[in-house]
Amino acid sequence: MERLKIAIQKSGRLTEDSQNLFTECSIEIQDGKRQLLAPSPNFPIDLLYLRDDDIPQYIEDGIADVGILGENIYVESGASLRIAKRLGFAKCRLSLAVQRSEKYSGADFFQGKRIATTYPNIVKKYLAEKGISAEIHQISGSVEIAPNIGLADAICDIVSTGSTLMSNGLKEVETVMYSEALMVANQNLSAEKEQILQKLLFRIAAVETAKKNKYILLNAPNESISEICSILPGMKSPTILPLAKEGWSSLHSVVNEEVFWEVIDQLKEKGAQGILVVPIEKMIL
Ligand code: ATP
Ligand code: MG
């Protein structure tokens, strides 16, 4: 029986969320502190712990089958892989920033300037699309200090809150791309590996759906049950059970959490009492 090799970041911002993705799907995993390749004892996957920069190449070469990495790293690598799923964590943006004292009136500013970045390919493509030619200096870390030490006029780097830029006297002036964690896969997986991937994606979807929904239980007088059902959309077929108390029923259903907060006052107005909202662990539609 084949096993799916999944590359994840060994140690960094993506590691914990990547590992949680498996454990929430009831897939037991081992961490990568002592071993590079960690088989799961209860699901046919092996985790391969790597530096995030190495993940695209490993998958393209078929050493790993699937990987979890930032969109920024995937796009920069130019590797031709398939995006199996957008995972929604590690959200950030890649932005151009200049010294705060600079007058900035538009992207033409970068004409003939020196830009320091870890993402030369993304920056080159962005500037080419705008018809701007600039000098790109590829550096591997601490990009934000480049303008202060006279190495560059501007930088292109990852931003989430902007506090790193601020503390280095820089201001963000253009967003080059938005990024989130992706699950990517080799284009030519064997049928058996593809089947394992689909099984994994099915579990991830069930966990995702469950997070968005809650199980709701409430008590209400019989005469308002039908109105309560119409207030709570998405309740195709609530379960209604008679209470021991004459003229009252208990209503059970699944609702979107956001909807629940919007209609809570209306529910109480209709006489709903003892409202319980409980988390759902897995949900298959
Ligand atoms: P490695 O040692 O594996 O090469 P790294 O130092 O290159 O790690 P990290 O800083 O751990 O990378 O970031 C990993 C990814 O997390 C980035 O490529 C990006 O997609 C995302 N990321 C980085 N910074 C932030 C942030 N401030 N907020 C949200 N996501 C971020
Ligand atoms: Mg890296």
Image: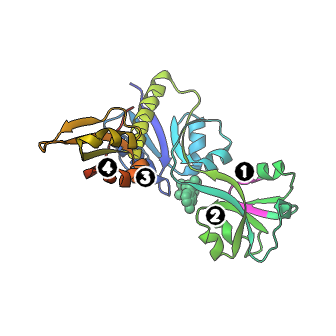
Q: Amino acid at mark 1?
A: Ile
Q: Position of residue 130 (x, y in %)?
A: 84, 51
Q: Amino acid at mark 3?
A: Glu
The color scheme shown is rainbow
Disc on res. 122: 1
Residue at mark 2: C-beta within 8 A of ligand 1: yes
Q: Is residue 122 magenta?
A: yes
Q: Amino acid at mark 2?
A: Gly
Disc on res. 141: 2
On screen, residue 78 versus residue 186, left or right, reads right
Kindly report which numbered mark, 3 or 4, lies closer to the viewer in this rendering.
4
- Marked residue nearer the N-terminal end (1 or 2): 1
- Marked residue nearer the N-terminal end (3 or 4): 3
- Marked residue nearer the N-terminal end (2 or 4): 2
Disc on res. 79: none
Q: Position of residue 18 (x, y in %)?
A: 45, 48
Other-residue count near label 1 (Cα within 10 Å), few / some / many at <14 / 14–19 / ≥20 = many
Ligand 1 falls in quadrant: bottom right
Answer above or below: position of 174 versus 259.
Answer: below
- Marked residue nearer the N-terminal end (1 or 3): 1
Residue name at image x 13 percent, y 42 percent: 246
On screen, residue 33 versus residue 75, left or right, reads left
How far apart marks 2 and 4 lie (CA) works out to 60 Å
Disc on res. 270: 4
For the N terminus, give its image quadrant.
top left
How far apart marks 2 and 3 lie (CA) works out to 46 Å
Instruction: From the image, tell me which residue sits under label 3.
Output: 262
- Marked residue nearer the N-terminal end (2 or 3): 2
